[in-house]
Image (tube, helix red, strand yellow):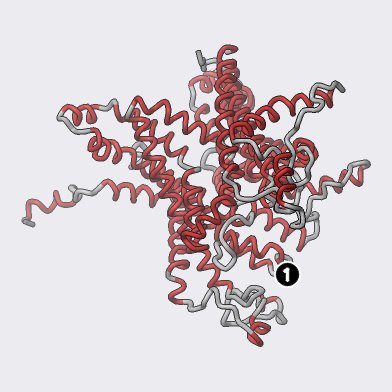
Amino acid sequence: MLTYTIRRLLISIPTLLFISLVIFLLLELAPGDPMAQVPLTVPDEVKQKMREALGLGQPIHIRFGLWIWQFFVVEPLHLLDIILGTGFAEGQQRVISWQTRSPVMDIVAQRIPQTLWVVGVAYVVAVIIAVPIGVYSAYRQYSLFDQAGTFVTMIGFSVPPFFSGVLVIVIFSVQLGWFPSIYDTTHKVVDWDSFVVQLQQMVMPVMVLALQITSQISRFMRASMLDNLNQDYVRTARAKGMTERVVVTLHVLRNSMIPVVTIIALGIPSIFGGAIITEQVFKVNGIGQLLITAIQANDLPMVQTLTFIFAVLIVLFNLIADILYGILDPRIRYD
Amino acid sequence: MTDQSAAPEHQVVRPPRSQWWDVWDQFKKHSGALFGMIVFVTILLGVFIGPWIYHADAQFVPTGRDFIALKDTRPIYNAIWDSGAKVNWAHPLGTDQLGRDTLARLMMGGQVSIAVGLAAMGLSLLLGTAIGVLAGYFKRLDGPLMRLTDLFLALPLLPLLLVAVLLFREPLAATFGPEGGVFVLIVTLVGITSWMQTARIVRGDVLALKEREFVLAARSIGTPNRRLVMRHILPNVLSPIMVSATLGIATAIITESALSFLGFGFPPDFPTWGRLLFDSVDRMVLYPERVIWPGLLISLTVLSVNYIGDGLRDALDPRIRGR
C-alpha cells in the first residue's frame, strides 16, 4: 500500500507539471496588456520598463520556470514564515497580481474562507441528507419513496444552479422575505443573534449547492446498496437471526459505503467548479468570484494561479480517493 | 398463400422484427423515458416549428410611442390575479425592457441552445468514440491515449472554458461573424472537454469485444482493420454510445447556459436560454417570468433528455429486454 501511495504521488508530479504547462501556454496566447490601464501620458519606454519589472520581458520558458518556482517554492516558504515567524522567503519575488499589485496568494487567502465555509457546509449537509435517502430507497426498491427519490435526484441533476439559485431567491427572498438574497461576507458572528443572521444567509447558497451533490451521492448510495443487498453474506446475517436494523446498518451499509466514500472524495474538487456559479448568483466573494473578476480584468497571474489551484485540488482528491479505496476494501490490491 | 391449413399457425408465428422494434417496445415500458421523449419532442417542435405559426420577430425593437406602449408588458396570465397588469394579447408572454417579444425570443433562444447541444454532443461523441476505439483496438495506442484521457479528466474544466472563451472570441468572431464565431467556439470547447467518459466506456467495450470469436472469424478471413472496426466493432458498441449521446446533450446545454449565465457566451441580441436568464436576473424582482421561463425550459429539456437516456440504457441492454 505504501509503495502504491508513493508511486501515485510520483505520477502526480508530471501530471501537475503538464497541466501547469497547458494553463501557462493557454494564457500566453491571451490578448491584453497589464499596462492598458496606465495613462497615455506615460511614455512608451517607461511602460516597457514597467512591463519588464513585472517579468514580461523574458522568453517563455524562463517565465514558466519562474512561475513554477514561485508557486512551488516561494509561496510555501512564505506560508511557513507566517506560521513559524522565520524569514526563509525574505526578498524572494512572489506571484504578483496585475490588478492589485499585491501577492496573489494573499488575496486568495482572504477569499478562501468564504468559499470553504459555504462549500464545506453544503458538502456536509448533502452527504448527511444523501446517505439515508440512498439507503432507504434501495431497501424499499420501487416503493413510492424510491420513485419520489429518483424523481428528485433527476431534478437535482437537471436543474442548473444558476436557475435553482435564482428561483429560490425569487421565492424565499423576494416573495416570502425569509432569507437575504446576498451573502454578506463582512458579517461577523459574535453572539446568538448574529449567528442566526449568519445561518439565515447561508441557507440558500448551501441548499442550492447541496441539491446537486445530494442527487449524485444518493444515486451512488442506492446503486451500491442494491449491489450488496442481494449478496450471500446478507442472507447469512439474516439467517443468524439478526434484526433488520443490524443487518442493514452494520453489514450492508458498511460495505456499501466503500465506493460511496471514494465518490465523495472525487466530488470535492468539482464542487469548487460548481461553486463558481453559485457564488456568482448569491454574490459570495469567494475564489470563484475572484476568478471571474480576474478573467474579466485580464489579470493573468491571478487566473493562472487560481486555475492551477483547482487542478491541484482535482489531482489531490483523485489520489486520496484511490488510496481510500485501497484502505477500505482489502480485496483491492494495487501491487 | 393463405390456405386453410396455414391459418392456425399464422397466429403463432410472428413476422420477423428488427432489433430496433424490440428496443422500442422495451423503451415504451419505461414511463419516465416515454414521458421525457414526449416533452423533448414537444420542446423541439415548439422551438423549430413554433416560429412558423407564431409570427413575431425576436429582434424587432419598437421605436417612438410604440416603444412606451410595448415595453415591459407582462404575460397575459398575469391579468387573472392583477387586473391592472400591463398585458397585450399580441404578446402572450409579454415583452422585455426593449419591447422585444418574449415568446419569440424564447423560441429563438431554444433553437440556438438545442443546436449547440446537438452539435457539441456530436463532436464529443466523434472524439470519444474515435479515441476509445483506437485505444481499445490498437494495443500500442492504449497507454498514451488513456494517459491523455486521465490528463483531460484532471483539468479544471469550467475555469479553462472561461479563459478559452475570452481568448478565442475575438479572432473567431472576425472569421465567422459575431454569432457564428461564438457558436463555433462554444461547440468546439464543449466538445473537446466532454469526450472523456465516452472514450473510457467505448475502450472498455472494445477491449472485451476484441477477444470474441466473431472478431477472430472476421480476422481469419482477412478482413482489414478498418473494415473490422467499422463493420464488426462499432455496431456492437452502439448502445453505450447512444446512451452517452443523450447525456452529452444534457451536459452541453447546461455548460453553454452556464457560460452564457456568467456573461461569457452568446451576445444579447442573439440569445440562448442561458443568456435570456442572465439578462433578466437584474429585473427578476419586478418581472420574475423572464427568469422563470428560460430556466424552466433549460431544466425541462435537460430533465427529459436525462430520462430518455435512462430509458435507452434499459432498452438497449439485451439482458433486461423482454422481461
Q: Amino acid at mark 1?
A: Leu
User: Is residue B34 left or right of A78 when viewed as pictured?
Assistant: left
Residue at 55 percent of width and 72 percent of height: B103
Residue at 70% in and 76% down: B81
Q: Quick check: can you spot residue A208?
A: no
* Numbered disc 1: secondary structure: loop
Left of B15 or right of it: where is A167?
A: right
Position of residue A301 relative to residue A66, above or below, is: below
The chain that hosts pointer 1 is: B
Within 10 Å of the Cα at label 1, are there few (<14), some (14-19), or many (20+) other Cα atoms? few
Q: Residue at x 41, y 45 (%)?
A: B125
Q: Nearer the viewer, residue A61 or B151?
A: A61
Question: Toward the viewer: A92 or B318?
Answer: A92
Would you say B18 lies left or right of A263 here? left
Question: Residue beneath label 1, please?
Answer: B286
Instruction: Report the number of discs.
Output: 1
Location of residue B146 by image quarter: top left
Residue B43: percent from the left, percent from the top? 47, 63
Compared to residue B67, the image places residue A23 above or below, namely: above
Residue A167 position, x and y percent, is 68, 58
> What residue is shown at x 47% (from left), y 28% (from top)?
B147
A179, above or below A131, in the image: below
Residue A59 image position (x, y, % from top left) = 60, 35
The image shows residue A46 at horizontal and vertical percentages of 74, 47
